[in-house]
Image: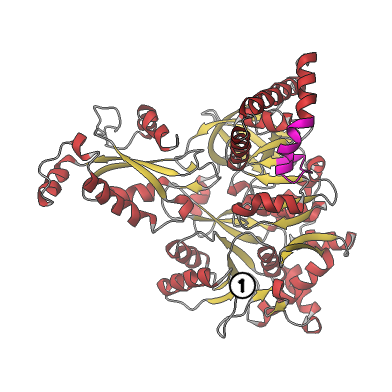
């Protein structure tokens, strides 16, 4: 099969926008909980009506401060309740949100502020405010900064936990007519948010995501995933809200009836899951890998590693049989396997489910590929991992497995209102409700992103099976996606390290790995000169590859490069190879361009050493 289309479930009138998702939720029950917020050590529900009231109060502040329709407002913060509140207020005031990862360097923040035109910023705390101020200094323009935590005479602050709403006007000061005029002025076709994504050519590009993208995806995904979302089912959102995936799912939850809690720290994730008791989760494969590893380590410490591994294999075997049945194959569940599974489901699997809070039956996995055995293990243990696929440019979920129609190893069928086509060269092409309107201020990149038929070119390769389930097989682009789902453009970092005097080549690795590492080769001619100047003599490549002063020199190049990116994108480890990349060695083309895959294939063993400990 080369193309599959899933018909739209819900159409929306052109005059509505993303804010209608919240208004519709309030209309269905203003006193029903929408968010759960941690205040002073305990969790408290916030009703849909109370959230809407605070949104309008904050939107009034933005309007009073001079925000005009179409103005951009940046948000630099970890995932938290205030993030959601700020973005909704921006939309109710007629503005456009510009999310920025809290891990971004001032260098990155400056570029996004410059390119987007955002001159108002919500920053989480004093530390992030300082980064924004540094970026503003580089920009040379005045930036109005609001902060969520802490305050001084120069800042306004929003501190719900302290009961101090410095940014929120009094209820009687809300101009309902002005708010409604601003809110309703934005139509489906208008830009709702600009999401900056790492590219392969250097500077991040701003993706113009429309109200149609978010609202249409929310309406159609909620119906498509009703079994997972449930009604008034709780979820714990801990992925960065700066990432389009988390926000697409959050808006789907607002429309679909879920209750959303936020965890701003992976270090507190297990503790927060125990308190919130989510019915479903949105996560990346790395989270499930860590939970599985932690569970095994716990079993090893108590001398029960063997029992854990038997329980794991039993869960995998049972899930594989279920998967075969879902594909229409005849697969029998042996009596012995059934008995073992029933036993482990009483004594071991509940402990694993307990890590998730005890009530989690489903988890949506995205951002990077999910190991099949891991998916089978969790499903067999009672937590079904539902894998999906998408990019920033598709508002994240372009395809997804449904709970009752899952094929492990695939990323499911297109969501309603979406078509997926496989090009002649194997590239995955997407058209539909989630596909963005184009790159901000970059018509050339926008034109290059679509084929003649209007399909977005994803840069990934894949195949569709006979039932229209997509399997991603590789990447045409060089963009690296870590195990945590972070997009990393290798070019700029490689270029900066390669600028070091004694470096010839630098190749970043980290696809579906927990962090970024680098393979480095040396410029032998410069090495000789540098070595003599340092009093080290004429070092061979083999000697230099392990010499402490060489390593220290390269570490300086790496440290300099790392200053331009966030921690998640930074180079954590590197190795100096005692080889040269040449055309004769098969690592360079005739025009001296790097053959990246050739390097990765030949040095796979060295790469594996980065992640073996």
Q: Write down the region rendered in magenta.
A: 346-363
In the structure shown, which secondary structural element does the residue marked by tag 1 occupy?
loop
* Farthest residue, direction front: 302
The part of the image, by quadrant, that contains residue 145 is bottom right
Count of number-bearing discs: 1
Query: In which quadrant will I find the C terminus?
Result: top left
Query: Residue 248 in magenta?
Result: no
In this rendering, would 607 be left or right of 81? Answer: left
Residue closest to the eye, 339 or 544: 339
In this rendering, would 64 be left or right of 548? Answer: right
Which residue is painted at 47% across and 67% down in the image?
Answer: 114
Which residue is painted at 61% across and 56% down in the image?
Answer: 265
The image position of residue 405, as x and y in percent, is 77, 30
Residue closest to the eye, 297 or 430: 297
Which residue is painted at 78% across and 80% down in the image?
Answer: 174
Residue 377's place in the image compared with 122, above or below, is above
Q: Which residue is mark 1?
A: 149
In this rendering, would 191 be left or right of 523? Answer: right
The image position of residue 150, as x and y in percent, is 60, 76
Which residue is painted at 28% across and 47% down in the image?
Answer: 498
The image position of residue 46, as x and y in percent, is 80, 65
Mark 1 is surrounded, within 10 Å at the Cα level, by few (under 14), some (14 to 19) or many (20 or more) other residues, namely some
- Note whether residue 101 is visible: yes
The image position of residue 599, as x and y in percent, is 35, 32
Residue 69's place in the image compared with 15, above or below, is below
- Note whether residue 414 is visible: no
In this rendering, would 355 be left or right of 533? Answer: right
């Amino acid at each position: 099969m080369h193309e599959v289309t899933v018909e739209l479930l819900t159409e929306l009138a052109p005059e509505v926008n993303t804010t209608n998702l919240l208004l519709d939720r309030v209309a269905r029950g203003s006193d029903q909980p929408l968010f759960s917020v941690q205040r002073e050590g305990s969790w408290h529900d916030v009703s849909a009506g109370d959230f809407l009231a605070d949104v309008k109060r904050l939107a009034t502040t933005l309007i009073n401060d001079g925000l005009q329709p179409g103005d951009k407002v940046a948000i630099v913060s970890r995932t938290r309740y205030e993030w959601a509140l700020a973005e909704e207020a921006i939309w109710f005031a007629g503005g456009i949100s510009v999310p920025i990862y809290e891990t971004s360097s001032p260098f990155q923040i400056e570029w996004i502020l410059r390119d987007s035109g955002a001159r108002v910023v919500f920053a989480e705390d004093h530390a992030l405010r300082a980064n924004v101020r540094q970026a503003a200094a580089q920009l040379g323009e005045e930036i109005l900064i609001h902060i969520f935590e802490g305050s001084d005479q120069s800042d306004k602050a929003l501190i719900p936990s302290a009961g101090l709403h410095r940014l929120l006007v009094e209820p009687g000061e809300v101009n309902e007519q002005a708010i409604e005029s601003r809110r309703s002025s934005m139509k489906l076709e208008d830009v709702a948010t600009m999401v900056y994504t790492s590219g392969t050519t250097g500077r991040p590009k701003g993706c113009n995501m429309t109200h149609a993208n978010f609202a249409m995806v929310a309406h159609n995904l909620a119906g498509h995933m009703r079994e997972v979302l449930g009604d008034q089912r709780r979820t714990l959102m801990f992925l960065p809200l700066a990432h389009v995936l988390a926000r697409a799912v959050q808006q789907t939850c607002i429309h679909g009836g879920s209750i959303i809690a936020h965890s701003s720290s992976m270090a507190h994730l297990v503790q927060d899951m125990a308190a919130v008791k989510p019915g479903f989760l949105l996560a990346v494969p790395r989270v499930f890998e860590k939970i599985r590893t932690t569970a095994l380590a716990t079993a090893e410490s108590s001398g029960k590693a063997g029992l854990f591994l038997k329980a794991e294999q039993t869960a995998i075997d049972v899930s594989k049989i279920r998967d075969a049945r879902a594909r229409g194959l005849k697969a029998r569940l042996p009596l012995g396997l059934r008995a073992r599974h029933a036993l482990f489901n009483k004594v071991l699997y509940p402990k694993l489910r307990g890590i998730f809070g005890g009530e989690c039956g489903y988890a949506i996995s995205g951002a990077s590929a999910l190991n099949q055995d891991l998916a089978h293990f969790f499903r067999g243990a009672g937590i079904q991992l539902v894998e999906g696929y998408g990019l920033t440019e598709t508002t994240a979920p372009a395809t997804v497995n449904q709970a009752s129609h899952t094929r492990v190893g695939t990323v499911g069928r297109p969501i309603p209102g979406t078509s997926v086509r496989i090009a002649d060269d194997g590239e995955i092409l997407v058209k539909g409700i989630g596909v963005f309107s184009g790159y901000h201020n970059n018509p050339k990149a926008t034109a290059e992103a679509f084929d003649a038929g209007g399909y977005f070119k994803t840069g990934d390769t894949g195949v569709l099976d006979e039932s229209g389930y997509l399997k991603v097989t590789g990447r045409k682009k060089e963009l690296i996606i870590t195990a945590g789902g972070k997009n990393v453009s290798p070019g700029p970092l490689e270029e900066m390290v390669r600028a070091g005097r004694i470096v010839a080549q630098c190749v970043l690795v980290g696809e579906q790995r927990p962090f970024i590492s680098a393979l480095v080769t040396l410029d032998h001619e410069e090495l000789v000169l540098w070595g003599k100047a340092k009093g080290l003599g004429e070092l061979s490549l083999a000697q230099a590859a392990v010499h402490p002063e060489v390593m220290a020199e390269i570490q300086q190049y790496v440290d300099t490069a790392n200053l331009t990116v966030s921690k998640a994108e930074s180079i954590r480890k590197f190795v100096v190879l005692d080889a040269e990349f040449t055309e004769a060695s098969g690592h360079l083309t005739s025009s001296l361009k790097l053959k990246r895959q050739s390097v990765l294939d030949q040095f796979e063993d060295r790469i594996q050493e980065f992640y073996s400990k």
